Amino acid sequence: MTNRRDFLSYSGAAVLAASLPVSSLAGQQEKIPARLIPGTDEKLPVIGLGNSQSFRNEDLDAAANLIDIFLEHGGGFVDAGGVSAMVVGRIAQDKNASEKLFIGNYLDPKDLGAMRHEAVSAAKGQGKDALDLVHTRNLAEYRSRHDQYRQMKEDGLVRYIGVARTGADNFDAIGQLVEDGLVDFIQVNYSLVEPEAADRLLPLAADQGVAVSISRPFINGRYFGMVSGMDLPAWAAEFDCQSWAQFSLKFIVAHPAVNCVLTETANPKHAIDNLGAGYGGLPNKAAQQKMLALIAGL
């Protein structure tokens, strides 16, 4: 299977990615755009950083380089589970950037006292008075113990709460949590290859004032295998798209319910390429349909 590294090596996109920070678009637009978290005056940049391998491997130099790149271009949302939360927190404090980063944490349901202790310890490690966001993949337990998450929020230990789960078979359960007013944030998969969230879940989140972050923009690299050897369509230039990575990301960001799409990479060139999706235009409805048809036909 073609992964992104192989794909870029012979597509020439690596050279393009390296040039993006000084491109004409980046020069005209200093930072990538940000969207309001519903019901607040707080904004999140539309391109975020997922749980990078450099975080998971505790590679502090590589992780710090990634965070520098994101901050330089106005990025802020970093999704960090397990040991990654402490790695990101340490780097944020070393750089005096704790308030510049919005860190998505994972806190699974358990005894309230244990949850509170974990939240306090994590916030201290991130240089924050309260965790920005805690979510869990355990949808049923989140519902049954929602009062504990809500209590931590009311006590000022956590600012936002929610769930993170991939798979269209989970969308009904997530949608019910949204309808019942139990989440501030949801994290779900949505892309050209997996567009199902747009059928009901994303419009529902928008209607209910729930923030949305998106995972799996490249289907764990499978997307690059699908487009391997193909030229980017000429009409992609109509919305300032310069690479296949941006083709996927711009489609996702074009949905108005999406606050941020999380891009998981440990490669600085890939990170720069991803951030390039935040510059310039976005595909309109007609272009989005062409994009879906193109990928569906592969």
Image (cartoon, rainbow, N blue to C red):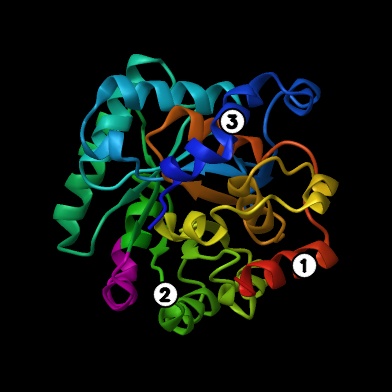
Q: Which residues are magenta?
A: 137-148
Query: Horizontal and vertical percent for residue 231?
Result: 68, 50
User: Which of the marked residues, 2 or 1, is nearer the chain's N terminus?
Assistant: 2
Query: Which mark, residue 176?
Result: none
Q: Amino acid at mark 2?
A: Gly
User: Which of the marked residues, 1 or 3, is nearer the chain's N terminus?
Assistant: 3
Disc number lying in front (2 or 3): 3
Q: Is residue 26 visible?
A: yes
> Is 215 situated above or below 183?
above
Query: Horizontal and vertical percent for residue 161?
Result: 41, 57
**Residue 171 or 274: which is nearer the viewer?**
274
Query: Which mark, residue 290?
Result: 1
| Residue at position x 57%, y 52% in the image | 229
Quarter of the image for the C terminus: give it. bottom right
Residue 143 on the magenta segment: yes
* Helix, strand or loop under label 1: helix
> Is 104 situated above or below 110?
above
Q: Are marks 2 and 1 in contact (CB under 8 Å)?
A: no
User: Which image quadrant for residue 90?
Assistant: top left
Count neighbours of disc 1 (C-alpha within 10 A) and say few if under 14, some if 14 to 19, many if 20 or more.
Answer: some
List the residue tagged with mark 3: 17
Counting the numbered discs, the total is 3
User: Which image quadrant for residue 265?
Assistant: top left
Query: Which mark, residue 167?
Result: 2
User: Which of the marked residues, 2 or 3, is nearer the chain's N terminus?
Assistant: 3
Count neighbours of disc 2 (C-alpha within 10 A) and say few if under 14, some if 14 to 19, many if 20 or more.
Answer: few
| Residue at position x 64%, y 80% in the image | 199
C-alpha gap between disc 2 and disc 3: 30 Å
Q: Amino acid at mark 1?
A: Lys
Residue 36 on the magenta segment: no
Count neighbours of disc 3 (C-alpha within 10 A) and say few if under 14, some if 14 to 19, many if 20 or more.
Answer: many
Q: Is residue 38 visible?
A: no
